[in-house]
Image (cartoon, grey):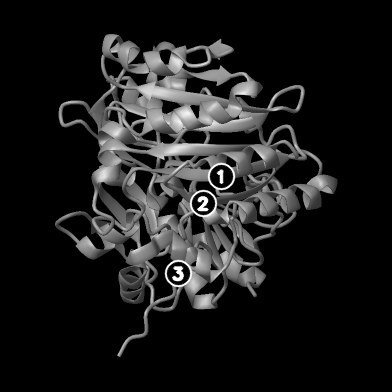
Amino acid sequence: MLEDVDLSDLESMVRGDVLRPGGKDYELGRRVFNAMIDRHPAAIVRCADAHDVIAAVNCSRSHDVPLSVKGGGHSVAGAAVCEGGIMVDLSLLKAVRVDPDRQVAVAQPGLTLGEFDSAAQAFGLATTMGVVSMTGIAGLTLGGGIGWLNGRYGLACDNLIGAEVVTADGRVLSASDVEHEDLFWAIRGGGGNFGIVTSFSYRLHPVSTVLAGGVVFAPRHAHQALRFYHDFARDTPDELATAASIWLDDDRRPTVSVGVCYCGSVERGEEVLRPLRAFGPPTMDDIAPVSYATLQSSKDEGFPSGRLHYWKSSILRDVTDGAIETILSLVADAPSPFTGVGLQQVCGAASRVLPTATAFPHRGQLYDFLILSQWDDAADSADNISWTQRLFEEMQPFLESAVYANNLGDEGTDRVRAAYGPNYSRLAAIKAQYDPANVFRLNHNITPAPTN
């Protein structure tokens, strides 16, 4: 337990604020994206710089109390906030420097995707990030980072070229292809297991106007639309990334929509997308040339603050008729109108990276399969959780024994191993080198490998 004198000592060492229970901003500071999470840290260190991060890590280690790390706080597992320990809040660290000549951005971990995109788009540049602008860049990148540009430019972690990392012993290490290469490999998909990143360096690419938006198909065409979508998505150029969604319309009928982003010439994109836009035909088609930043914030309204979330996720490689029937039949019984199933495509450049080239192992043509359940009233939690688990169980014959870590809840060690796949053993060895005492354990945790 942390005593008042311990917190007073911590306050004397940091430039930022130390928020205590009952004090100003504490209640706001402990809130995260998923309203199901209700934990109470002994202290929230709202860091002003990397030195504050070091002080918080040293305090946690010396007093043997839990340490959690909040960047954007968007994880469904709620790992950003701990019970009775120290919560490191990075949300004030929002500096970003873009070098348009070198096409590189150096960014602090408190940035959201929207803030990062805005800075890069000022120069007509971007790199792969997620698809909801309120998400933090830190957790997204460390877990892999699937987004609309993955087909042409790879994942967020594929575009990371360097990082500054505060390790468990309070050091600040530079990690890249030429410094602490093992650590650099591990943080590109291995999550927050190895330290707290206080600076990310990204490779940027020329991206300005994209051909993007979506089509919606009539409920009576839902099965055929998913069948057509899978066939269409398997044979697309690198410039195109897609995502299908299955949701309930106002009459509670399962409905299929397909979102797209084509990041090449608009004229060529129109040709590539013509078959998708002609199928059905769609009941709605809002695909048009838009700014990349506009696309990145287009899904935000679907994730308002204060909702309760429970997700189940896996990797799906083949959208069979059996999988389609299972999804559609169970979505028809979804208890919440805000719930849906998503198939986000990993394709092109991201699919061609070797599974062992970075810690993120899920390569090849595939979909991040996500049952995203969300609802407003805590009294409805049991029904929503039960339905989500039932759909996930029914889908098991069609899913890989794998999961995208950024969509993983608190689901036990077997699921954590599924997130890291064939890279788990190497990650455990690197964990033993940089965090043998498992200081950074409030995450999808990798147990340090035994040392001789």
Q: Which residue type carries mark 2?
A: Phe
> Element type at marker 3?
helix
Q: Position of residue 209 (x, y in %)?
A: 34, 15
- Residue found 65% across the figure and 46% down from its top: 34
Pointer 3 residue: 58
Which quadrant of the view contains residue 249?
Answer: top right
Q: Position of residue 435 (x, y in %)?
A: 38, 73
Residue 322: which numbered mark, if any?
Answer: 1
Relative horizontal placement of residue 430, taking residue 54 as reference (left or right): left
Q: CA distance from mark 3 to mark 1?
A: 52 Å
The quarter in which the N terminus is drawn is bottom right
Residue at the bottom extreme? 452
Pointer 2 residue: 398
> Is 389 situated above or below 104?
below
Residue 117: which numbered mark, if any?
Answer: none
Q: CA distance from mark 1 to mark 2?
A: 8 Å
